Image: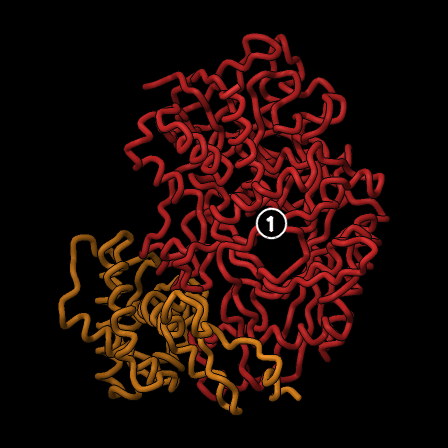
Chain colours: A red, B orange
Amino acid sequence: MKNQFDYIIVGGGVAAATIAKGLLEHKHDTSILILEAGPEIIAKDRRFWWDYITRGERPYTFTYDQKFEANSTGNIDYQTDGVRVKAYGGSTMHWGAWSLRFRPEDFNLFTNTGEGADWPINYEDLETYYNDAEAYLSVCGDDSANWVPRSKPYPVPPFEWTAADGEMIKAWEQLDVVYQDGDINPGKKSKIKSGKMPVARYRKCMTTGTCKYCPIGGRFNAQYVLDDLKEDSRFINFEVRVNSPVHKVNTSSKSKIESVTYTDNINGKEHTITGDTIILASGAYNVPKLLRASKNEFWENGIGNDYDLVGRFVVSHSMLNVVGKAQSNPNGWFQEYDFPTLMSHSYNTKEHQKKGKIFMFKNRTTPNVDIAQLMIDGKTREEIDEIVYGEMTVNIQAFLEEKGKHSNRLEAKPGKDRFGLPQTTVHFSRTEEEMKNANDRLKLLEQIIEKMGLEIISSRVDKPGGHHTTGTARMGTSPENSVADKFMKVHDTDNLYICSNAAFPTGSAVNPTLTLTAMAFRLVDHFIKKKQN
Amino acid sequence: MNEEVTSIGGSVCNEKLSAGLIFAEGQNLTHQNKEALWEIFEAIGFSWSNTIYNSNNQRSSWYEMLKAKTENAPNYTGEYVNAIYVIDELKAMYGKEDAYKKLFFESNIDNSAPPTTRLAHCKVYVVNEFIRMQITAGGFKSWGTKYGGEQAKNYHGFLGGTRYNRISKVRAYNPDSNNLKNE
């Protein structure tokens, strides 16, 4: 078994796939090893898909953190169970594929608000890589939208709004939500136009709405990329090892990272593999745990942790949720896509940053009636008609931007999970001011529901959770304020990189995967230039 | 466990079984088995009046599901054969039309509990899954038009039409005509 590689990538998700593809396409014989702790679960399998349709079962859910494997402390429960897929392909096995860029102000949060952190790069540094990422993920979107500056059109046209979106669109217009003064052209009172959700789909998407397990590979999954790389005869030195949790990064000096040690879960044997460059791409949970577990004479508190920053500044999205009810649904509407099509960035702007930006969207599953379940329950056609055309609920949701705090921390707890990775504890609290701001934002959502003529039946700020966790090994300008530099290289090392949401200093109000993919493209570019120099 | 006392069926329907899938490794469905199962599937469309003409336009999807569930583990062949025994007894007792009426509307089976009789196995592993498949493959389209609304075009799991967007794949928002029914 080969035990020396040019690059070792820990983790087998979208970041790993993007980096491997970029490096291999640049130089075909580059030797790359990807070590994935989880198993391989087949995608695009028809039997799995039929079990999803008929029984609601998805083949990867057994890899989710269980309660006993990941818990939390603090003044609010942090959802750690059921949010991450630990398998070949990573969380792109189950993601919703919403692919939104961060906005320029997200890179300057501290400068703008005095809270959180700034990125060591600006939006402009990443813009061309966003183009690359959108082309790679086949993101569909609305070219006429101007909520974020872009130099290229979307590669695929957007999904249209559904008829059921119509009432909310009208309410937004009446409340000046869709169009609002923004800061795209400061001083010119430019209006922000948003509205159609960008989603990562290949052109063969058939809009089955079963994105959680796509039957035809129409929704991006890192597994497809990795499979292609493995099968490409040009890439003779590319290898993926699944069931291989890495538990230590080894160094030969303070700056020189030499190898990683992993366990083969199939036979229990331990292996140490050396690499010229080592990239940690295993997510905002595992990257900090691995760094802190890698203690040695040069790094007594773990690699990159001389200033006790690894695992701190946990950033999460909290979901705001308001549900309204109409007395009837004469059009018999139900959600036909099962993914959201309507969004607004009116409150995802610089002037809302201090209080916490929100990214609003109509919930992906309302209005809806589970007609099949009613039939299964023995309801007659007449009874089902009454339900389908009867009361209708509509749900508006928003992600609330949260700012990293030193006291919020993710760390390993004693014991290993079922895949040989350290178990997790998240220490997370919200301040009274944060709760007040969240509740203020909630009132806006309530206004929208009321403007639609609906009766509010539920209004709540959901608990934070691990779906979009960022910040746990963040980039910055020095070891005193961060774990990694602007190229995501761990400070004071020569060859250890982080390509993960962990490296994000802020989380914005939108989903992080497109930005992570753009950062992976930027890292590939960095490696290529470094070699050339 | 599902300890339901069923009010329908006879000794076959009410025979006790363990809740797990009925073992059938190495067995195959015959042509006659498939035709008998197709009758159950067709009866769903008749009972809820939710096929536009008949169920035949769903046959290829249904058959593909059957194949996927009998040629891959865990194998459903035993469940499918059991369902045929159950429906045969119900038909013998009540006649064809009432047999399906009783099975779909009057079985008293707890759908969320592990099935512990032949009837419950038939309902949970076959009828309920056929219903989900039938709705997904097009049965949903019959809801939407009762009060003059537009026919539904898409649903969770529906594979329809072309992958290009020239023709709307959903009931789309049209600012000029949308929501008239709600005003």
* Image side of residue A462 versus residue A233, left or right: right
Q: Nearer the viewer, residue A297 or B128?
A: A297
Write down the chain letter for disc 1: A
Residue B183 spot, x, y in % from top left: 66, 89
- State which quadrant residue A153 falls in: bottom right
**Residue type indicated by callout 1:** Ser
Q: On the rendered image, what quadrant is the N terminus of chain A found in?
A: top left
**In the rendered image, the vertical position of residue B96 relative to residue A320, given as above or below:** below
Specify whether residue A418 is in view. no
- State which quadrant residue A129 falls in: top right
Task: For mark 1, give the secondary structure.
Answer: loop
**In the rendered image, the vertical position of residue A396 relative to residue A224, given as above or below:** below
Residue A532 spot, x, y in % from top left: 50, 21
**In the rendered image, the vertical position of residue A39 relative to residue A464, given as above or below:** above
Residue A522 spot, x, y in % from top left: 56, 34
Residue annotated with mark 1 = A151
Residue at 34%, 40% in the rendered image? A228
